[in-house]
Image (cartoon, helix red, strand yellow):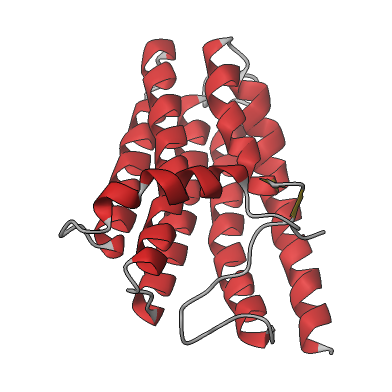
Amino acid sequence: MTNDLPPYDQRIARVLVGPLVKSPVTPNQITLLTLIIALGGAALLATGDPQNADWGAGLFILSRFLDHFDGELARQKQMTSKFGYYLDYLSGSTSYAALFVALGIGFRDGLLGQWAIALGITAALAAVASMFTNLGIDKASDDIDHEAGDATGYPGLKGFELEDGIYLLGPITWIGYLEPFFIVAGVGASVYFLWTVWVLVGVRGK
């Protein structure tokens, strides 16, 4: 199911990015900043230290929220581009892949033992593979403006997207339930990849 409204975080970003419209800041710079912040958060999560994990989760949430700023800035500055489109996809998939690998490393002494690393790697590969299937969906979709570098959104409803679940990473980490979240999200990454494959097959079959 697709969103019938722009996601709430995107609408917030649309307002907050206003002061940057007349600045020298470019959308691609914001994209790279979100990637750096996400990798920093993942590095903290990989340590397995609860206090580092609290900060790491916060940084990752921040990176995912800021991920909406580059597209909004590009639209308001009329700087949309195919390069920015691909860079945004690469940044997002790399961020999630790093998150899953980091969590796997961080929980290698937990419930799953060394299988946590295997789950992290599997989920990371699913995140990267989903990037390619989503690119395929975009290419095959008639309602995507390829020249402007538009991308298809996540499934969602009433202003909320599936990806918004990542905002739960912070509260769940802070109350001590990060490991179960990792297991569920790790499996969910593979399920999401299979869903994108199904959508891609359907779109190409039209």
Q: In which quadrant is the C terminus drawn? A: bottom right
Q: In which quadrant is the N terminus drawn? A: bottom right
Residue extending furthest left? 24
Q: Give residue 71's position: percent from left, percent from top.
A: 43, 62
Residue 114 visible in this rendered orientation of the protein: no
**61, 3: nearer the viewer:** 3
Q: Give residue 29's position: percent from left, percent from top.
A: 24, 58
**74, 64: nearer the viewer:** 74
**Residue 80: quarter of image:** bottom left
**183, 118: nearer the viewer:** 183
85 left or right of 36 in image = right
**Residue 102: quarter of image:** top left
The residue drawn where x is 44% and y is 12% is 50
The residue drawn where x is 62% and y is 41% is 164
Q: Give residue 129's position: percent from left, percent from top.
A: 59, 65
15 relative to 129, above or below: above
Q: Give residue 69's position: percent from left, percent from top.
A: 40, 52
**89, 132: nearer the viewer:** 89
Q: How many marks?
A: 0
54 left or right of 109 in image = left
Residue 192 visible in this rendered orientation of the protein: yes
